[in-house]
Image (tube, rainbow, N blue to C red):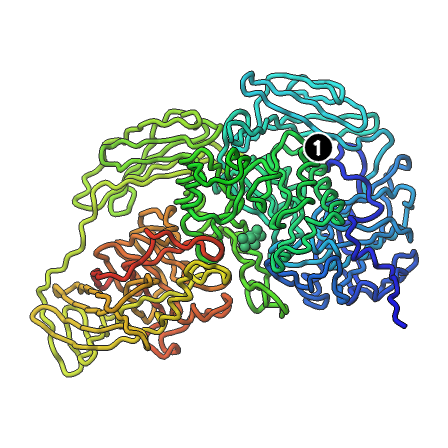
Amino acid sequence: MSFRTTTAVDYVEDVSPGRGALPPRAWYSSSDAASLSLNGRWRLRVSATADAEDDSFAEEGFDAGDWAEVTVPGHWVLQGDGSFGSPIYTNHLYPFPVDPPHVPTENPTGDHLRVFDLPADWPADGSAVLRFDGVESCARVWLNGTDIGEFKGSRLPHEFAVGHLLKTVGNVLAVRVHQWSAGSYLEDQDQWWLPGIFRDVTLLHRPAGSVLDFFVHASYDHTSGEGTLRVDSDVDGRVTVPALDIDVATGEPVTVPVRPWSAETPYLYDGVLATEGERVPLRIGFRTVVLEDGLIKVNGKAVLFKGVNRHEWHPEKGRALDLETMREDVLLMKRHNLNAVRTSHYPPHPAFLDLCDEYGLWVIDECDLETHGFTEQGWRDNPVDDDRWTPALLDRAARMVERDKNHPSIVFWSLGNEAGTGRGLTAMAEWIHGRDSSRLVHYEGDWDCRDTDVYSRMYAFHAEVESIGQGLDGGTHKRRELPFIQCEYGHAMGNGPGGIADYQRLFEKYERLQGGFIWEWIDHGIKHPELGYAYGGDFGEELHDGNFVCDGLIFPDRTPSPGLLEYKKVIEPVHIEGDGSDGTLRVTNRHDFADLSALAFEWSYQVDGETVEAGTLNVPSLAAGESADVKLPEPPADARGAETQWTVRALLAADTAWAPKDHVVAWGQFPGVSRPLPSVAPTDRPALGEKLITLGPASFDVRTGALKTIGGVSVVSPRLDVWRATTDNDDGAEWQSDTRYGVLWRTLGLHRMQHRLDSVEAGENALTVRTRVAPAAREVGLDTVYRWTSDGTRLRLTVSVTPEGEWTLPLPRLGVRLGLPEADQVKWFGGGPGEAYPDTRSASLVGRWQSTVDDLQTPYVRPQENGARADVRWAELGGLRIEGDPEFWFTARRWTTEQLDAATHLTDLTAGTASDSGSAAAVWVNLDHGLHGIGSQSCGPGPLPQYFLRAEPTEFSFVFSVTD
Ligand code: IPT
């Protein structure tokens, strides 16, 4: 006989959204109704299975005195130092067998318990609602021993009517949270799986006659300059907006002249919705979003999204974000010229949307839905194409739309991410279109655009994006009529993304292309005592996707990465262009709405990288889209043959809500007098000693021709170097069908080049060392000649490289590497202050910079090539001055490329000293003539051909001298 008991936890595998919750409604805070936060310390008991314990813990009088404690909001796996289980990271694979709606028997379950009293002034009348803003992934709730329901939909609110159950003292709130549930099949987003009550728990008093649900309709007619406001409310009341003299009944429209809301000019009007029992503050933004002439228009204008995908992330708290962290995200976005956010891949904490309204960001609000793992089985059994799941999908759509419908910042509802196609998605789109005709619907997964108002793609290559811009991409009739956005592009994993300037040029060129959203905002590294930041696999996961979870524009601690600085420059809202030659620049206002009155312009003039004079530049307050030619002043001081530049900056003219006065919004740099190249007359003659050859300030090994000292500085001789610690974008994602050079380079052996010495020739006025540099097992090689000359004080090295054999691959880098016994302070004249590579160099500003060797490093969570400075004319470190002919890429680090390449976490990298590294160097310096581009192939295109470093005959020089 076999049997299976039905247990009290069958709801876990039930595809329905749940039981007992109130219908969804707008999320708001009241001016006068009482509320009680139930955030704080809760008792916690974690069990291995869903039904390991009975529900007696929910009963009054249960003694949980020996339970652990956790903080709510929070994830239990990020608390308790691992004793409550660990996080799991997978990109799209379900970390459990795919057999919907079943989940594993091993189903970590956290029983949460909280006892609370009502505040003394809690009103005796009315009712009360208990609200959960986010619980992953399924919860059952009891209040004072009564089972009040259960729910799924992790990043969506759920409310329960509890007034009849409340007591003045000793209320027992019991919440059983299961890590896995049928809902997990709908939540296969690329992120950590983190169970817990991770958003607020709040008890809301609902006075008699209080507001229930309401919908603020606030449109703007750009032809008349008038806004129309109508607030539909379930409970009748009045709406007042003092600044507009509005005082109308709910449901009644009123039209008045207004200032419209846009992401650039986020004008909000304060209002109040008053019903008999309650007053609710309103923040009203008037704007109209339409699809017209095949374009997304807001207030009559086509907008260009300069966006980012934002997951909620904090390195210690996971997705339990506090308000200050949310504000930091918004401020960082505004300060880096972003104007849009896609809330990948779920509705964020509602406070984040308040901030978007207030500071001004266009929002794609995305539903908590992704079934990506079904792609492994050709999308068979995909819940979004199975009617049994449709109620759950509709519930999710409604919980998002109803909660967030009063935010002016939201212009798109997104059905979800990577869920294939199916009837369930169509049902969601139909419901959303019916409920809210004032916004557009987005979903990327259906390239025919059956359900959507925009053609959206992710990681499309530049060439395809261009053909879409030209309308040459074909597709269904409906799609051909739609505007295009890239909901994800520019995969910011590790060093990169490269090539975003090239995308932006396309977006700005073709009307149909309305911009895109970089993937993604923040690295989801988890702070770890031994590893610095942990990523997939660091918690012993059975299946994981490594550091694919660290692919943000900011590091886990929210420090901007070079990728964010690049993006800021690429999307700057003012273009300052010209070649400086005729003293005229062209300034273009690339805003969609704002004129330039908020900005002040400043010029400065650099001689050899140092600013010698600066002043204000008069730029007319151009309207959005307008350009003007602006004259630079006469070049100041006589530059005495030195190199000069003009730098023009657009700064905030006054403090704003998001940045102080003088914050740099945009800039341009223009050459003046060009640089005199360093020259060394080859007057000195190499002198042959017993062990050494001397030439000018330098000595060389007589046998190998290796440089040993320059002046008093001993060096590990410069020699040809073509290798770099491959970046995530070099290595590419394993599913990439395109050529992945990181892999091919290693296969060819570029990381283990052998240097064969052919001859050392001490000539009349030069020391020439001939070599061949090549990997074992291959016939290709680089014939490399080092030619040293000197005028007695300065030493010049000319490197000539001639490829031999058939080189089918580009080179990672081409230059020399040398070692120094010590170096700390670094000064240079060239691009800075941050790193740059051929296709990530927009933000590199030519000037005089200084740093320490340590600060030259970019701390990518998984160590990899980083820290190069572009266009370097000269650099000084460790007692040496190095000048380039031509300019070079400069890198210095306290470990070798091999050590960097082998490291998996930042904590693997430790500075060595000259003696303990077994060589004469502690600081390794790369002087590169060329670097291969970065691209975005960790999930997208590799570098464009113009950023390839091809193996071809090349010659470049450096001049070395000692500093005092
Ligand atoms: C795309 C996903 O939508 C996103 O969640 C993230 O996983 C990103 O890729 C990569 O980091 S899906 C992509 C594999 C086509």
Q: Residue at x 37, y 67 (%)?
A: 745
Q: Is residue 179 left or right of residue 653?
A: right
Q: With 302 as the anchor, is 617 left or right in this view?
A: left
Say which element carries label 1: helix
Residue 912: quarter of image: bottom left
Q: Rate crowding at label 1 as few (under 14), some (14 to 19) or many (20 or more) other CA atoms within 10 Å.
A: some
Instruction: Check the picture and name the quadrant holding the N terminus.
Output: bottom right
Determine whether 72 is above or below 437 in the image. below
Q: Residue at x 20, y 64 (%)?
A: 800
* 154 vs 915: above or below: above
Instruction: Give residue 405's position: percent from left, percent from top.
Output: 68, 34
| Disc 1: which residue | 435
Give, as a three-letter code, the residue at label 1: Arg
Query: Which residue corresponds to the image point at 38% horizontal and 56% vertical from the top-left?
Result: 851
In the depicted view, which residue is nearer to us: 200 or 808?
Answer: 808
Report the side of 455 relative to 727 (left or right).
Answer: right
Residue 557 appearing in the image: no
Residue visible at 24% across and 43% down in the picture = 644
Q: Residue 783, position in %: x, y?
A: 22, 70
Q: Identify whether 149 is placed above or below 439.
A: below
Locate the C terminus and report the quarter of the image it occupies.
Answer: bottom left
Residue 532 in sight in this render: yes
Residue 561 rendering spot, x and y as whole percentages: 47, 52
Q: Give the x, y percent position of residue 143.
A: 88, 50
